[in-house]
Image: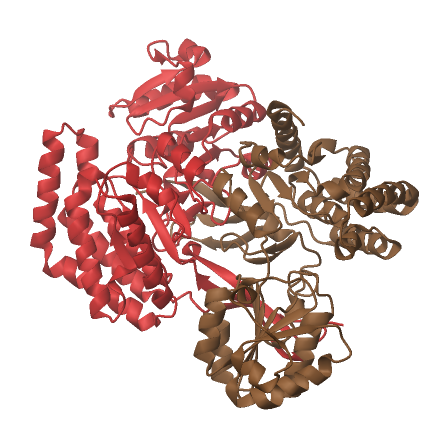
Chain colours: A red, B brown
């Protein structure tokens, strides 16, 4: 337990650091990022020791294999983190960038200048690599970050944050630009919701966390919620492509929020598509569930319950439904989707355009796998996550999405008539 | 009094309307806007009758002259509203616009598509013209709006909203796209903060309102708060220009949030600038207040109290302070400013650039009047207000700021390796 006042002191420290960071040179920020990369390389043993302790405790605590996998910092993940830090350092600095300058009839030049947000509060699950990725992106954007990671990763996070703080200090920047909440007590989340020093709160996790933060937070919230993602296979679609996309969406990495969870297929294709899909899935461990109409074609699969339509499995389960029209698919997605990632497989141009326009999701795809909803895949270089909140940044968030703009006006004595 | 459940039904009606509006054609939206303009022209008598009743009640209630002015819908204001509606109708439709399409190495084309927000809740003071302006902009952006105006303007608002709803209906659009909360009870504000059907809440008003909404709202909030706005007169500035900007900022329209409230002058210029300013203000009714150093130069002016530095007067009062450096001015503004509008008068390029970069305000000006912080003046065509919230839209908000983007991806069967 930690007293609320002590936690609020962390917010104040981050706020003070953010004021220096907003004015920091691109060079100083990049030096800190590269210093962190160097520490991940040179001091791997310390990270691995802390991570082993976390893994051991989690195993004793009975954590599932999938969750243990997310907790593990292996050689591959460390190499990816190092490459990511180097990439972020090499990116152009967004701060101070001036956009869209126009000259008004009176000669006043007006435009917008890109600026940091201030202090970002980040509440996330037990992937310790998120600690490094989120800190790197917020630093590049000129912000301070207050981290509250999952309790299973606490020892790993402590070492990683310590390395980041040393790198900041070495670069002449305030080490409080990266701060870890010194407790994994759930009450700390509520405290963060009430901190006046946070300019933005990013909760990443399940429905309960998102709802708690939405209700309690007094600052802007960019929720990173679950993905109940659909593929709609249209009449006349390329069924081979539809099978390939379904397979990729479901099995390539089932534990991620951009994995495919439901397939809606037009009645005109169901009798050809569903058996082909079942055959293609034979070699995998995917469990199929279906509505009544799907089960008349694949009688051996389990029946879908009402709960199936709104469940994010994050597992090798896929639920199938036969629909009579694009409209029915759109209505189903509007009702059960979670505004995360929605895809259509079609050859019919008006249907592709209508699906693109009418589906309300952070990424809408035509003839491509939902697994592309990822900052690196969409060309941002890196991501802090995928916002399912509509304002400010809907979808993948990189460095730019962690900044904002103010208006600027350059005059020569203009006054208003 | 109105039961909370009844108010929530208004939110649901707006939500339902917003779903149709998101898909509405540009032509239908523009027909509704022009229909409203036509009603303001043809049925002026009905508006004037309702406005007279509001004005009469307000006068009996002892409203100040300044507030009565804001409540009045005279011929000039109606003409401006008609011109504004015609301008908004003539603007390009932002919805469905596709931005920044790039092609990824695998051939996937990714970009963003502009979409509406959904339902905007708007809590504002007693200017009935805001009812028309806000409704026009949210409609153009494909949103529905739930309006909660000041009680003094209730009769005027009822007539204006009725005209808007007739215009929507005539254009084949759902009339619930523009809804007025049927009470001016303050409890309705709290209810709006808790409505799950609102996608954005815009409170426009004083500190108490903004704080209440920030604390209670469960949806994103774009606060439109007060302007404690400064002009810093640098050493070596063009003093004639500085006097002209001060005069314009203070007296051209003192009751607005972008009016000038404080002047900070460098000690090197104070002895020449302050007497000139006083002379220039002789013909006006402006009351000057000053810190000790200002009063050694202008001994006859009133002393400034601590409260003066953080007060938005919205009146013919101006407070003066002598500072020793740009740093001191920056610190004073960071401490007492309200992130609204801040200006510098300088001939020194590094000082201009430093002021632009370091001052955290929705508009930062060099050598121009703060009165330019206005959607029309900055080239947006119209505005719903000036956001002092940093996320999504910091500063003047027009049609585009009432929309967001989703990601789209156009493929030909791409899957993730």
Kindly tell me whether residue A134 is visible in this rendering.
no
Q: How many marks?
A: 0
Residue located at (37% from left, 65% from top): A19
Quadrant assignment for the N terminus of chain B: top right
Percent from the top left, x then y, of residue A228? 41, 30
Q: Nearer the viewer, residue A378 or B79?
A: B79
Q: Is residue B356 above or below residue B185?
A: below
Quadrant assignment for the C terminus of chain B: top left
Q: Is residue B266 above or below residue B406?
A: below
Q: Is residue A97 left or right of residue B282?
A: left
Say which quarter of the image contains residue A172.
Answer: bottom left
Q: Nearer the viewer, residue B88 or B325?
A: B325
Q: Is residue B280 left or right of residue A44?
A: right
Percent from the top left, x then y, of residue B339? 53, 62
Percent from the top left, x then y, of residue A104? 68, 71
Q: Is residue B18 left or right of residue B109?
A: right
Say which quarter of the image contains residue B365.
Answer: bottom right
Percent from the top left, x then y, of residue A382? 34, 53
Q: Nearer the viewer, residue A35 or A196?
A: A196
Q: Is residue A325 left or right of residue A71?
A: right
Kindly tell me whether residue B126 is visible in this rendering.
yes
Residue located at (14% from left, 27% from top): A62
Q: Nearer the viewer, residue A177 or B205?
A: B205
Residue located at (27% from left, 68% from top): A173
């Amino acid at each position: 337990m930690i007293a609320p006042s002590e936690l609020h002191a962390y917010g104040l420290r981050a706020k003070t650091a953010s004021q220096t960071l907003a004015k920091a040179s691109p060079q100083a920020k990049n030096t800190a990022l590269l210093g962190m990369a160097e520490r991940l390389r040179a001091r791997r043993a310390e990270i691995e020791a802390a991570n082993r302790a976390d893994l051991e405790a989690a195993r004793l605590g009975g954590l599932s294999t999938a969750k243990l996998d997310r907790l593990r910092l292996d050689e591959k993940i460390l190499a990816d983190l190092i490459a990511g830090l180097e990439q972020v350092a090499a990116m152009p600095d967004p701060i101070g960038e001036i956009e869209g300058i126009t000259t008004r009839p009176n000669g006043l030049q007006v435009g917008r200048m890109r600026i940091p947000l201030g202090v970002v509060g980040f509440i996330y699950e037990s992937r310790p690599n998120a600690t490094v990725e989120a800190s790197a992106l917020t630093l590049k954007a000129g912000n301070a970050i207050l981290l509250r990671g999952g309790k299973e990763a606490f020892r790993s996070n402590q070492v990683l944050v310590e390395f980041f703080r040393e790198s900041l200090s070495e670069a002449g920047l305030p080490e409080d630009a990266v701060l870890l909440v010194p407790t994994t007590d759930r009450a700390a989340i509520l405290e963060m919701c009430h901190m006046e020093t946070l300019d933005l709160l990013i909760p990443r996790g399940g429905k309960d966390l998102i709802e708690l933060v939405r209700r309690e937070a007094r600052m802007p919230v960019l929720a990173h919620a679950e993905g109940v993602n659909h593929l709609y296979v249209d009449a006349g679609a390329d069924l081979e492509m539809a099978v390939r996309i379904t397979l990729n969406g479901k099995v390539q990495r089932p534990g991620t929020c951009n994995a495919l969870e439901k397939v809606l297929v037009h009645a005109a294709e169901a009798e050809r598509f569903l058996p082909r899909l079942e055959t293609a899935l034979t070699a995998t461990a995917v469990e199929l569930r279906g509505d009544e109409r799907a089960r008349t074609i694949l009688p051996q699969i389990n029946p879908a319950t009402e709960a199936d339509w709104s469940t994010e499995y994050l597992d090798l389960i896929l639920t199938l439904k036969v629909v009579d029209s694009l409209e029915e698919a759109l209505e189903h997605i509007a009702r059960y989707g979670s505004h995360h990632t929605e895809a259509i497989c079609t050859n019919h141009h008006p249907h592709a355009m209508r699906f693109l326009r009418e589906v309300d999701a952070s990424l809408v795809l035509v003839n491509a796998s939902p697994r592309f909803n990822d900052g690196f895949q969409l060309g941002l270089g890196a991501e802090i996550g995928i916002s399912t909140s509509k304002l400010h940044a809907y979808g993948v968030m990189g460095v730019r999405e962690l900044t904002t703009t103010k208006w600027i006006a350059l005059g020569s004595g203009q006054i208003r008539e």
